[in-house]
């Protein structure tokens, strides 16, 4: 039996938590593409930009802020917890991000894009609901429900991206448990095998 379980994050946490606006208007296209691909975007990718909360989102300011890009946008407490869990610069790029409220007034609480850059090829295509497509210049997986081959996951991997499709972030159960024990709010996980 496996020692740990793995979950995909982040997922929609409900209607109460706040949601930040799309980063499209606040970030250079190259940096945004790197974030989606799990590549280093540079710690100054959001320098000088203030991203407001969406007016149609909730009002609860949580430790992990919901967003349309499926990024981990976390508080100072979340950043510190990741560091204390042993996640270093080879695992997670830390990008400061300034947040404003719905009236565009800056929020003093510090937030960061906690950007996993470690990628691990560990999808089990036989057990996953997925399809592999080949195009002229690239190949791509379309994943509807994910299962992992846990034998391919290094024992030190607690937070990483799926190499087959880096849009998906995976978190190990012991790190998720630490987040829950610290009472950090706003992070919603999903079990493997559920519809993505």
Image (cartoon, rainbow, N blue to C red):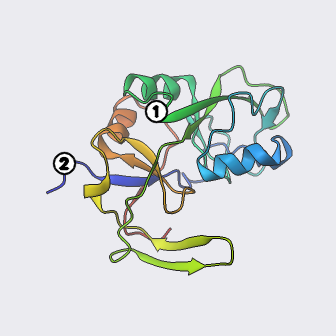
Q: Which mark is residue 79?
A: none
Task: Classify 17 as above or below 106.
Answer: below
Task: Classify 147 as above or below 105.
Answer: below
Determine whether the residue tagged by mark 2 lies in a helix, strand or loop.
loop
Tell me the residue that label 2 is attached to: 3
Task: Classify 126 as above or below 20.
Answer: below
Q: Nearer the viewer, residue 176 or 137?
A: 137
Which residue occupies 34% across, 32% down? 181
Which residue sits furthest front?
A: 137
Q: Give the x, y percent position of residue 96.
A: 68, 27
Q: Earlier in the sequence, mark 2 or mark 1?
A: 2
Which residue occupies 56% across, 23% down? 76
Q: Which quadrant holds residue 128?
A: bottom left
Q: Is residue 147 left or right of residue 83?
A: left
Disc 1 residue crowd, few under 14, some 14–19, many 20+, Cα 10 Å = some
Q: Give the x, y percent position of residue 46.
A: 76, 32
Disc 2 residue crowd, few under 14, some 14–19, many 20+, Cα 10 Å = few
Tell me the residue that label 1 is attached to: 184
Do we see residue 54 in this rendering? no
Q: Nearer the viewer, residue 63 or 152?
A: 152
Q: Give the x, y percent position of residue 125.
A: 38, 74
> Closer to the camera: disc 2 or disc 1?
2
Which residue occupies 42% across, 42% down? 159
């Amino acid at each position: 039996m496996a020692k740990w379980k793995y979950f995909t994050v982040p997922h929609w946490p409900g209607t109460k938590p706040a949601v930040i606006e799309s980063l499209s208007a606040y970030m250079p296209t190259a940096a945004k593409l790197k974030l989606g691909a799990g590549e280093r975007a540079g710690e100054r990718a959001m320098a000088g930009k203030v991203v407001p909360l969406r007016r149609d989102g909730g009002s609860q300011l949580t430790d992990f802020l919901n967003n349309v890009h499926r990024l981990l946008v976390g508080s100072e407490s979340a950043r510190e917890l990741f560091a204390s869990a042993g996640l270093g610069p080879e695992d997670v790029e830390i990008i400061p991000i300034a947040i404003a409220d719905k009236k565009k007034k800056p929020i003093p609480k510090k937030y960061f894009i906690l950007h996993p850059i470690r990628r691990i090829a560990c999808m089990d295509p036989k057990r996953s609901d997925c399809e592999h497509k080949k195009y002229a210049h690239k190949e791509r997986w379309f994943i509807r429900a994910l299962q992992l081959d846990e034998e391919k996951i290094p024992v030190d991997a607690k937070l990483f991206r799926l190499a087959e499709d880096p849009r998906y972030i995976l978190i190990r159960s012991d790190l998720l448990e630490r987040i829950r024990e610290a009472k950090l709010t706003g992070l919603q996980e999903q079990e493997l095998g559920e519809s993505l």
